[in-house]
Structure formats: structure tokens, C-alpha cells
Amino acid sequence: MKLVSESTPAQRIRAIIVLSPKGKLVANIHALYPTDGMGRLQVDVFTYGSNAIDRQVGTASGYGYDKFTAALRGLKIDGITLHDHAEATAEAKRTLSQWQKETDQTKRDAIRDRAKKKGINFCNWSRDSNGWAGVYMSPALELLRDLGYQVIDAI
């Protein structure tokens, strides 16, 4: 007998459980993928607060990119705003500027290490600027993992 997860309809769904760094359930994410590559993908994010369950919805359509992460963009889990690929927040830009101004390599390494723990990534190494020239936030679920959350694919 075939597993439910191996059925044709199940190939279009994804379910994710998000646990806080302390192991508390903070969110469930349900995704429904389109039947073709260009259709609309929908995500429902259910977050668990002190008294209520909140539902947020995101969608993305088109072809040739990560629609799942794009659909999560701007939604919040446990107070954390999720980002698409290659987005930079004001904090990320300030962190890069701080790193660029620092001349001591040990301090630069410490800045970079602290940044990574916040989901801030340096990119675009440039000899002209003597180091990193760009910055971006870890996208969606990767950001949660960077912050110590457990992201579990259930389906």
C-alpha cells in the first residue's frame, strides 16, 4: 500500500511545524502548490499566541523562482518578519556599515558572527571596498533556523 505522502494530491501540499528555541509550538505552515509551474501557490501560516490562533495568508505566482519563500514574505512568526531572497533590512545595512568601518580583523569577525546569529549575511566580496559590499537577510525558514527555531517538514 502506498503512503499518503506519495499520492498525486499530496505532491501539491506541504506542512511545516515551527518550534521556538525552547521547543514551544509557535506556528504551522500549510502550502498548496499549483498543478502547473506557473499557477498560484498559497501559504497559510497559523501562529499560536497566548490566547488565540492567528491565520496569515500569502500567495505567489509566476514561473522560474522560489514561490514558497516569496509567498511567506512579510508574514510574521513569533514576531519575526519573514523575508524573500536578497532582501536587506535597515539593521542589516547598519551592520554591514559597521563591519566596513572596522579595521581590526578580530572585531570584524565578531561583527560578522553576531550578524549571522540574527540572520544577516554579507555578500559580494569586493577588492575595491576591501571586503563585503552587500548584505541580505536569510530568507523565510532559513531565518528562523538562524535564530534557533526548529523547522520541521511534516509533509
Image: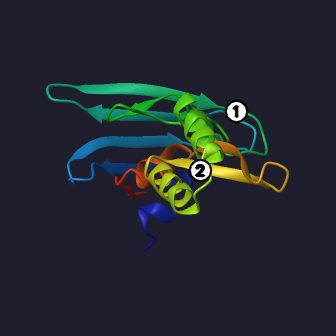
Depicted 74 relative to depicted 147: above or below:
above
Q: Quadrant of the C terminus?
A: bottom left
Residue 61 is marked as 1
Residue 124 vs residue 144, the one in the foreground: 124
Residues at marks 1 and 2 touching, judged by CB atoms closer than 8 Å = no
Which corner quadrant of the image does residue 41 belong to?
Answer: top right
Q: Which residue is mark 2?
A: 121
Q: Amino acid at mark 1?
A: Ser
Secondary structure state at the residue bearing disc 1: loop
Real-space Cα separation, disc 1 to disc 2, in angstroms: 27 Å
Depicted 110 relative to depicted 40: above or below:
below
Which residue is drawn at the image coordinates 43% and 42% (left, top)?
30
Which residue is drawn at the image coordinates 65% and 45% (left, top)?
100
Which residue is drawn at the image coordinates 67% and 46% (left, top)?
66
Q: Nearer the viewer, mark 1 or mark 2?
A: 2
Which residue is drawn at the image coordinates 20% and 48% (left, top)?
24
Q: Where's residue 58, x and y in %? A: 53, 28
| View extreme (left): residue | 51
Residue 64 vs residue 128, the one in the foreground: 128
Q: Amino acid at mark 2?
A: Asn
Q: Where's residue 154, x and y in %? A: 38, 57
Q: Where's residue 149, x and y in %? A: 34, 52
Secondary structure state at the residue bearing disc 2: strand
> Relative to 83, is 149 on the left or the right?
left
Q: Where's residue 94, x and y in %? A: 57, 34
| View extreme (front): residue | 104
Residue 75 vs residue 34, the one in the foreground: 75
> Relative to 98, is 56 on the left or the right?
left
Residue 4 vs residue 75, the one in the foreground: 75
Depicted 65 relative to depicted 50: above or below:
below
